[in-house]
Image (tube, rainbow, N blue to C red):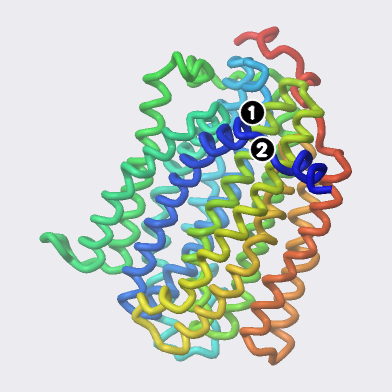
Amino acid sequence: MFSGFRKKYIGDRQLYRRVLYMVIPMILQNLVTNLVSLIDNIMVGRMGTEQMSGVSIANQFIFVFNITLFGAVSGPGIFGAQFFGKGDSEGQKYTFRFRIMISALISLVAFAVYSIFDKELISLFISKDDTAEKIAQTLMYGRQYLGIMLISLLPFGVGQAYSSVLSECGHTKIPMMASMSAVGINILLDYALIFGKFGMPEMGVKGAAIATVTAKFIETIIKIVWTHTHYEKNRYAVGVYRGIYIPSKLMADMIKRGTPLLANEFLWAAGMSIIAQSYSIRGLDVVAARNIASTISNLFSTVYIQLGACIAIIVGATLGANKLKEARDTDNKLLFFSLSVSVVVGLMMLPLAKFFPMLYNTEESVRSLASYMIVIQSMAMPLWSYANACYFTLRCGGKTGITFLFDFGGTWLVILPLSTILARFTDMDIRMLFMIVTFAEIVKVVAGYFMVRSDIWINNIIDDVGDSKAETE
């Protein structure tokens, strides 16, 4: 029995060496990014609850933008991973070009929407039951932070297009190095501009935003410069800006398969923000506590999120090479590996529940609630990990419609209505409410298990596109 389990779910050293070689730089890159956010959050949290809540609310909209952008590059990224597996750099170039164009478009749309409706959007997350002074200060700090962060949307968007193509080629160290190069400057500027150190003005929330924007510019510049000074490793980047041409059939297929992913990521992120808004009607103390808990949770979640992305790259490349049985076998092993690692990560996060909230200058009731939320999130880590791995498995085979139903359906048909009903129409204690909503993720776990097991995702999608070299610019 054990030998059968081992054969199905445990890989050889070569597989894990390949996974770790690819995923460790990806994890480190995102750990660095989230570590900057954590330090930024703590520094803002030292100023007070209103500042922390305002920044937290503003970051909900940055979160929606980031996730939507991820969805936008994911569709063409499916084709890019399979073109890479096939060794077709021309095909990769067209998918890369498409990613740059769609990222720039989404960045400009987000800039316009957030600039015009910033006050109305932030106000949705502020409970009217709080004092007038609290409401006014939270709104002011949120608008200050969001207004400056808008400057970073375009460079971040273009940077994501570069990160996605570098990762699918196995150059995961470059985005990591870009993030690590920017992190020191971000932390230094955070400290200097928030608290007025080293001769800098004391700018508070505005200082935190300026530091983050500066870091994002630096990170993107490094990725762009490396890509275009190493053409021998990045043949897809040669001539990518010489025009906007993309073969019509490839363009149509990327739009067809990418639109559900884009819609899914946007709606999922919007759904998570609506869930956060449901919590917020219980008061700004809940907003602050959830912000503290989410900050540490996001740091640890990086591991399973990047393992999921690694599944998409490795299994997608195997599908592109037309090794369908190997893709299925590899996916089994990587699903189990991701789940196992998430259990360990959740256990590592658990002890921090008591100590991490003490870093914030806020009320004891907020710290206590934050500690409870951290415990619940650490216990839910394996559920999130497995659902995330199923999502990337379904996506790498081009089953974006199924992926849409899986991710969007689980959020909008189950978790969101549940949180809305419990928050708005019951007097349930916030702790019980948070636990029920968090563990509702089990619905997606069950659905993901059966979808992956059905093998509907095992497809080589680029054979249908044809040889990209047959069409030239």
Q: Which kind of residue does numbered mark 1 sit on? A: Ala
Horizontal side of residue 347 vs 213, given as left or right: right
Horizontal side of residue 471 vs 369, given as left or right: right
Q: Reply above or below: 438 against 34.
A: below
Image quadrant in which you'd find residue 395: top right
Q: Is mark 1 on a helix, strand or loop?
A: helix
- Look at 68% across and 14% down and name the residue there: 468
* Viewer-side residue, 216 vs 3: 3
- Residue 79, image x and y in percent? 68, 28
Q: Do the numbered discs 2 and 1 sit on residues whose CB atoms are within 8 Å?
A: yes
- Look at 35% across and 54% down and name the residue there: 212
- Residue 202, image x and y in percent? 20, 67
Q: Name the residue under label 2.
A: 312
- Look at 71% across and 27% down and name the residue there: 318
- How many C-alpha atoms fall within 10 Å of the one at disc 2: few (<14), some, or many (≥20)? many
Q: Which residue reaches farthest right?
A: 454
Q: Quadrant of the C terminus?
A: top right
User: Of callouts 2 and 1, which one flags the residue occurring earlier in the amino acid sequence?
Assistant: 1
Residue 104 visible at all = no
- Residue 88, image x and y in percent? 63, 15
Image quadrant in which you'd find residue 427: bottom right
Q: Name the residue under label 1.
A: 81
Image quadrant in which you'd find residue 253: top right
- Work out how far the residue at label 2 is from the one at label 1, CA to CA, in angstroms: 8 Å
Q: Is mark 2 on a helix, strand or loop?
A: helix
Horizontal side of residue 224 vs 189, given as left or right: right
Residue 396 numbered mark, or none: none
